[in-house]
Amino acid sequence: MRRLGPCLAAQRLFRLRRPSGCPRPVAMATEACRGPGSSSSSMEEALSRAVPPLPPYETREKAAAPAGAALEQHSAEFMGYYRALEAGRPRAELLARLARDFGVEHGRVAEGCARVLRLQQQNQQDEPGALLQAEDRLRHYLTPRYRGLFQHLGRQEGGLRFLVELRRDLLDALASRQAEGPHLREMNGVLKNMLSEWFSTGFLNLERVTWQSSCEILQKISDSEAVHPVRNWMDMKRRVGSYRRCYYFDHCAIPGEPLIVLHVALTDEISSSIQTIVKEVPPLEVEDLNEITTAIFYSISLTQQGVQGVELGTYLIKRVVKELQVEFPHIKVFSTLSPIPGFTKWLVGLLSAQSKDQDRSSPFTDPEYREISEITGDPAVEILKRLLANNEWTRSEKLARVLQQPLMRLCAWYLYGEKHRGYALNPVANFHLQNGAVLWRLNWMADTSPRGITASCSMMVNYRYFLEDTTSNSAAYLGTKQIKASEQVLSLVSQFQQNSKL
């Protein structure tokens, strides 16, 4: 999207990624700018100064007191040093060293394990105090040293923002393989758990976005929209105008910085097409309450990748439902209109497998293959792979009509039957099913944008939230991996089981 206005260039809020350079007030930042020759030694010095030693078990409670002036200075120096490093490989190298060299002290862990085992063998049932203390000591020494650094950084002004930035870089390093290994993955898990505590609901503020919100907030909401990109200024105005609601969470320590954003359409029925929600039409200024019976959650986007994996989306939906119930007590229907990322890729994989082994899989029936071949004049399997890759099939009404039924049943199976460790393979489905939603309705030609056709052959899905059943549905899904689905979806799944072979 183009900039929303000239005022925004000068007024944008602080971004998590600062430009490279040498922050003046911090000594170690100057070291980071001296060039590659001294980078290794300065990096080691920066980490050694910043990472506090794990205190002895006997003095752990005193050491847990708020950081003194020296530790505060070292934490501030480390933030300056880190931000002075170029994004990418230099930061990845520092994170790899931090994870590898400042983790758990394995010698003390081994001693602690041996002591616990020895006391267990001595059967300390009559006096369990010694065993409990030994287990507590072991837990203490299982704490990696870098956790102390993260704790001290979290207490600094701007420290929580910095940790979100650091974890974003950590995830980037793992994804790009600029740094990898079990130590780095372990540090990512430790930091994610700490952020989950710091970003619990008690510290989050729910904010509504309107056309009267600041330019900076509107720009950030626009930039962060990952599901249905905002096209222009009028498109943004519609998405926060009448019959629409937009909410975000920010943190009390990072005010004005959206963490996750939820867009809602207020309608009179469960929507089956995203075009009816985001199309450009003049917004109506006055809402007719009689026409608002349904709330459609049509986009939820994480704006800060550093909090990926932190449970924010579930809490945001619950808070927004309560907000809408106060504003519109008569709303009884809550549903999503959700994308289905990954479906086309999954289907092309099935077709590729069939090309290699005719007996292995057959997503389509023989009559369907023949009809496709008659329309295209080419072998069905190969032409389907090509058509799905370039979206050409949507240009032929006849071909689209022939493909509708098989693609619908295949997509229903993808959402309902394809699993990862027993849970829905599709990440969007897994998210809403964990929240207790029902796999409600599959919609054909629901997203005819190039992105929608490429990702899911134009289909979208409604996950419906029956508020009185969400707790039991969530427990059934998480406990027994049972997916609650509507008759329409189960009928399509049955058709798949009868007509397709995987």
Image (tube, rainbow, N blue to C red):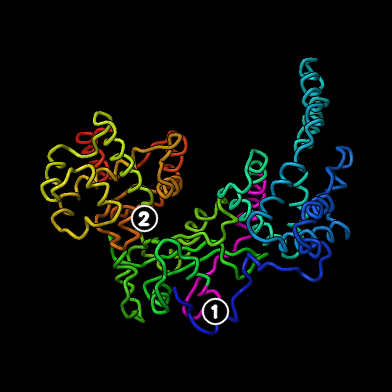
Residue at (49% x, 73% y) in the render: 209
Question: On the rendered structure, is 310 left or right of 451?
Answer: right
Residue at (59% x, 55% y) in the render: 307
Residue 422: percent from the left, percent from the top? 43, 34
Quadrant of the rendering where the N terminus is positioned: bottom left
Total numbered labels: 2
Residue 138: percent from the left, percent from the top? 78, 32
Residue at the farthest top position: 122
Q: Of the numbered discs in the image, which one, if any, rests on residue 214?
A: 1
Is residue 335 visible in the rendered image? The answer is no
Vertical arrangement, residue 87 with respect to residue 500, above or below: below
- Amino acid bearing label 2: Pro
Vertical arrangement, residue 501 with respect to residue 217, above or below: above
- Residue numbers of the magenta segment: 190-219
Q: Of the numbered discs in the image, which one, if any, rests on residue 407?
A: none
Asked if the residues shown at circle 2 and circle 1 are in contact, with their CB atoms under 8 angstroms apart, the answer is no
Residue at the farthest front position: 37
Q: Which residue is mark 2?
A: 339
